[in-house]
Amino acid sequence: MSDKILYGYTGIFDTPDEIILAANKVAEDGYKKFDVNTPYPVHGMDNAMKLPVSKLGYAALIFGLTGTISAVTLMYFLSVFDYPIVIGGKPFFAFPAFVPIIFEVTVLAASIATVVTMIALFFKFPNISHPLHDTEYMKKVSSNKYGILLQADDLKFTEESAKELLAKLGAKDITAIYYDQAEISTEHKIFEPKFISLLIIIAVVVSGSTYFALNKLMFMVPFNWMMEQSKIIPQDNNSFFSDGKAMRTPIEGTVARGNMPYQFKGDPESAGKYLKNTLLPTEKNLDLGKKKYDIYCSPCHGYYGEGDSRLRGQFPNPPSLHSEKVRTWTDGRLYHVITEGQNIMPSYASQMTRKERWATILYLRVLQRSLNAKESDLE
Amino acid sequence: MNEIDYTREIPVIEGRPALREIDDLIAKPLETKPDKKYYLALAVTLTMTGIGAIALLLSFYYGTGLWGNNNPVGWGLPIVNFVFWVGIGHAGTLISAILFLLRQRWRNGIARFAEGMTIFAVMTAGIFPLIHVGRPWLAGYLFPYPNQHSLWVNFTSPLLWDVFAVSTYFTVSFIFWYVGLIPDFATLRDRTSNKIKKLIYSVTSLGWRHSNRHWQHYEMVYLILAGFATPLVLSVHTIVSFDFAVSIMPGWHTTIFPPYFVAGAVFSGFAMVQNVLIFIRKIFNYEHIITLNTLERMNKIILLTGSMVGYAYAMEFFIAWYSGVQPEQFTFINRAFGPYAWAYWIMVSCNVIFPQLFWVKKIRRSIPIMFVIAVLVNVGMWFERFVITVTSLSRDYLPSSWAYYAPTLVDGAILLGSFGFFFTWLLLFTKTLPVVSIAEVKAVVEGSQPSHGDH
């Protein structure tokens, strides 16, 4: 025992009434570093020990408000600036419809943070060693006895006076608790390399598996089966109809609403020659063009027309739109590509109105000009 | 039989057991080897789970066409089951949080178990929204994360609110449960002589040493969590009801849905907790901890919420008539007398009529009768969700698109599997963790609190 350090003196009581009196006496005696160990919280003990009220409520308040504010800001930013979409005629910032999520995030943040604060600050997690562990004293107080502990590092503490005080209070089993400095420390261990590396491992595993699930798994059999479905698509065979096609032709003599026949089918040269862009490059038209380009063209051609597709090999990468060839094409020629498609590039005639197609071309010109500016643009 | 003396508060725990006895009793299932009956029960639930798992694999391989869902009825059994299980999950937090705030000390004996059931029920419920999309591996898209499409989720959709509500509910319930377990882990740690168990309990008890300086913060955290969990538990089924109420389907588009759903959830949750507790107290000899008085109190809550549900049924009819909206009127008449009348009347008799028997004290205190009534309540509540989901969809505004919905065998197998899954967890729980809170029960044993001072 001699090489061990004295942690304190403990005494045991049998009833809650005794322990509460004892705690009160010790506190009145001027002891600061003492503790009471009871198998369950005893009413009135905080007062008896003269403990200040727990401040954890502030942690809940602060983290809860942080949750509220982050939820509001995030939703505001995402639905008003980053990708505004009109849904059900609601305004972009539809506050009443945001309330449920704001509430949930607040509760989640506050609950997790309060518990983590308690565990980290007050329980000194991840340090779970303590001189009291594995003592007879601990075994008793965790079951059916009420114990009091006078710590050796209190200013008033001397071995004699502690023993005397405990005896005077009527405590039983007065014992000294010793500990070995090498084995037990009461410091915080959050910054210990072992613990930090555990956290890092967890972070790596979580982010790695998320990355795998989102970027690899989705493209493996059978998770990529969305393409094959046993429904009939327009280009399929279908023995149900006499012509063997799944797709039906319009009834003879009828024209679809808004249909405008395209004169230059399969004739890009004439389209380039005769079709003229009637839109002016006003700010409004360019805005429209940018919007449509970003939606319809950018997945394959890239946001700046450089052929840097975002489809990651699921569709062949197109050539750059900044080539000499495309730059010298007339607007009409470009209109033809959008309307009819070109080789594997599909037609966009059914997705985009005529005006939108012309506006997109205006915007495409801006993109091209940005990489191949003329001297005169500098002014 | 024996008259209750009302001049004195009824003790929550009967017979004034010594604190050590409580330890021994509650830790006993963890320290003894499970018997044959336990393995038999586990075999049954695992078989059920297996059947469900096979049905699910088939559904993923061949697609959701194996289910009964058809064109007007796009929401079939998966959504019915989801709402049912989330509902079951409501009793736990209600008992542990709301009754805690209301200082109902009788809750201490049953809170831990009810919370466990909450967690398992929410886990079971969570399966259904995932599978009903047909490709559960795409569920990640439900969370707003910066993605390649630069698209975000729709924050104004009740279905998204659901994602947040259910995952928050699960997390907070789990934390609440764990915080409650910390002192018990410490008690177990100091009891056991087995090295491995000791290591596990040492880690899970986070170094707890029953110090009052810790108890003080601990109680504060418990209070804060209860304070948060209370509105949370009300919000979860409210939001689930928004899935229906925010749409414009006749029979769904009503403002009574949130309180009606919450009452229904508590109703079915309590019934389920009561059912299982009847077994637990018998098997583990907890009759003096989970007393007949406690069960009677639960039955009173079942009676109360059952009457609220009955009121809601009546009010729905009244409002359909009073609003003068034809499709609404049709929907309700169709519910009661249309092709799903059988389901409707099962629901009404199980939820409204039978629980009214609890007005009689003898019935409230008779274990076999209360067991049967609670089983019927859960049957009724399952049918309530069925009636709401299916009748409205199968006959909406446009008679040309009406169709009858009938679940298939695969649907049934998945439902069976969900029960298996839930009860498997429950069985494992009874053998691995203390199903009654040791510390909380000790705190309400007579004579465990100082006789002077205020409390």
Image (tube, grey):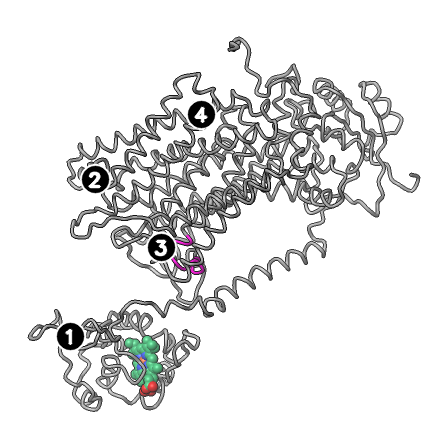
Looking at the image, tell me whether mark 4 or mark 3 is earlier in sequence order: 3
Residue for badge 4: B370
- Residue B168: x percent and y percent? 47, 45
The residue mark sitting in front, 4 or 1, is: 4
Secondary structure beneath dot 1 equals: loop
Tell me the kind of residue under disc 2. Gly
Q: Which mark is residue B338?
A: 2
Query: Is there one chain holding both mark 2 and mark 4?
Result: yes
Closer to us: B151 or B181: B181
Residue A117 vs residue A146, the one in the foreground: A146
Q: Dot 4, how many residues are within 10 Å of its Cα: few (below 14), some (14-19), or many (20+)?
A: many
For the residues carrying marks 4 and 3, which lies nearer the camera in this image? Answer: 4
Q: How many numbered marks appear?
A: 4
Disc 3 from disc 2: Cα separation: 36 Å
In front: mark 3 or mark 2?
2
Instruction: Identify the residue at image location x=33%, y=37%.
Output: B384
Q: Badges 2 and 4: C-beta atoms under 8 Å apart?
A: no
Amino acid, disc 3? Asn
Which circle's residue, 3 or 2, is located before the other in the chain?
A: 3
Gap between marks 4 and 3, in whole Å? 45 Å
Q: Amino acid at mark 1?
A: Thr
Magenta residues span B130-139
Identify the residue position indicated by label 3 in the image. Answer: B154
Do the residues indicated by labels 4 and 1 lie within the same chain of the protein? no
Mark 2 or mark 4, earlier in chain = 2
Mark closer to the observer (2, 1): 2
Determine the main secondary structure of the stretch shown in magenta. helix
Q: Is residue A369 visible?
A: no
Q: Which residue is mark 1?
A: A249
Q: Chain of mark 1?
A: A
